[in-house]
Amino acid sequence: MGVPAGQRAIYRFTGLEQGMYLRRYWSSACIGCTMKPRCTPSDYRRIARWEHELVLEAAQRRLDRMPNAMTTRRRTVEHVFGTFKHWMGYTHFLTRRFANVSTEMSLHGIQPQARNSDTGVLESHKGHEAGGCVKHPRFLV
């Protein structure tokens, strides 16, 4: 990792800030550097990098090489999930954030099972009843 004067910033330590591990770098050559007044007002120019920043940079390089990647993704992958949700009768998720949307999507997945149990019929995995279905004991009262 470099600094503006061409010197190498040396790894010093890793700290935890707001749930992220940040690696800290700086060069010992900053004190005698002629560019220091234009670079930083402190004794050293300290550089903080998130531990996964290399992954982000690699993803950005891939996007720079293929600028239409997100457009292609929207047309292929996201359209399929949008159609799937529409078939289920929902045109948008009611919740936000990944964990909540994931839970909502899981509930959509068990929805057909819930519908079958409302009618009193559950599919038999063994198939030893006529037609492969058995009456659920809860509904035999």
Image: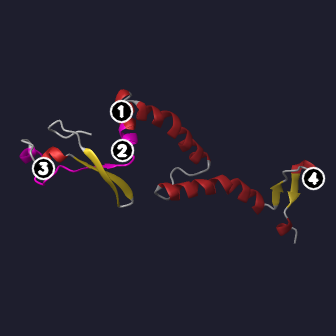
Residue for badge 1? 61
The CA distance from mark 1 to mark 3 is 28 Å
**Mark on residue 129?**
4
Amino acid at pointer 2: Glu
Residue for badge 2? 53
Disc 4 + disc 3, Cβ < 8 Å: no
Q: Position of residue 120 (x, y in %)?
A: 81, 62
Comes first in the chain, label 1 or label 3: 3
Comes first in the chain, label 4 or label 3: 3
Q: Residues within 10 Å of mark 4 (few under 14, many from 20)?
A: few
The CA distance from mark 4 to mark 2 is 58 Å
Comes first in the chain, label 2 or label 1: 2
Disc 1 + disc 3, Cβ < 8 Å: no
Q: Position of residue 101 (x, y in %)?
A: 52, 55
Residue 86 shown in magenta: no
Q: Position of residue 134 (x, y in %)?
A: 88, 57
In this view, 134 is above or below 72? below
The structure residue drawn at horizontal position 38% and vertical position 56%, both measured from the top left corner, is 20
Select label 2 or label 1 by which is in front: 2
Amino acid at pointer 4: Glu
Amino acid at pointer 3: Thr
Q: Is residue 107 left or right of residue 50?
A: right
Q: Residues within 10 Å of mark 1 (few under 14, many from 20)?
A: few
Q: Quadrant of the N terminus?
A: top left
The CA distance from mark 2 to mark 1 is 12 Å
Comes first in the chain, label 4 or label 2: 2
Residue for badge 3? 40
Amino acid at pointer 1: Arg
